Amino acid sequence: MAELRILGRITSINMRKVLWTADLIGTEYVTELWGMPHRDPRSPEYLALNPNGLVPVIIEDGFVLWESNAIMRYLADTRRSGLWPVGARERALVDQWLTWQVSELNAQWGYAVFALLRKNPAYADEARIAESIKNWTARMHILENQLIKGGGHVANGRLSIADLAIALSSHRWYSTPFVREEFPAIRDHYERLKATPEGAKYLSPETP
């Protein structure tokens, strides 16, 4: 198989999704550092690969792919990894939670994370911070119930790429300084994945 290049920066939660997937399935790759403050992804060179100007991007034998969840699916599928099921229904459930992670879970934390974790002075509205935390917490309740039903995994009762994506979202939850509800199933899922060699690398305090 042709050399796999992964473009991005490890401080990006979406880059860590892809690197974690690649590491877990044992595929070889080289990384290229893109993203501020290193190399501007809004440069013409990078925009030719991803017109959104976001990381990560992968390149393999001339094939270019962006969007982290799509990259995770591609890597797990082309390497015939058990992280991406073969059966259509099991695959659909993994896909469902990958989509939910982006469209529902991650969509709620933006204001709170910029205010409390990133310390961005433009995000100082206390009412909006509280609303962001409220909506974020509501989605964490959904995740807690799913992990209880799933026996500690996000889908199909076993490890999949959905677990990696969700654990990275949980990392953001636990890294943001606020008084949060405690969710035992989420905490257990997060700590189990963090205890693995790959999880320890990508759920690091240095990359919240």
Image (spheres, rainbow, N blue to C red):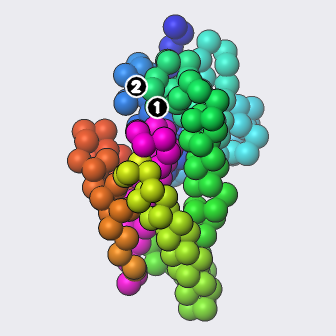
Q: Is residue 97 above or below residue 173?
A: above
Give the magenta-colored segment's residue range.
154-179
State yes or no: residue 57 in magenta: no
Q: Is the residue under label 2 in contact with that under label 1 (CB below 8 Å)?
A: yes
Res. 68 visible in picture: no
Q: Residues within 10 Å of mark 2 (few under 14, many from 20)?
A: some
Locate residue 25, reporting x and y percent: 40, 25
Does label 1 or label 2 sit earlier along the sequence?
2
> Relative to 186, is 108 on the left or the right?
right
Q: Nearer the viewer, mark 1 or mark 2?
A: 1
Specify the quadrant of the image occupied by residue 70: top right
Residue 46, numbered label? none
Residue reaching furthest to the top: 1
The residue at 41%/39% (across/down) is: 158
The residue at 58%/61% (across/down) is: 106
Which amino acid does the dot numbered 2 rest on? Ile
SS for dot 1: loop
Q: Toward the viewer: 104 or 126?
A: 104
SS for dot 2: helix
Residue 83, numbered label? 1
Res. 53 visible in picture: yes
> Relative to 70, is 83 on the left or the right?
left
Locate residue 6, reporting x and y percent: 52, 29
State yes or no: residue 172 in magenta: yes
Per the image, the residue denoted by label 2 is 25
Locate residue 204, reporting x and y percent: 31, 53
Locate residue 171, reporting x and y percent: 39, 59
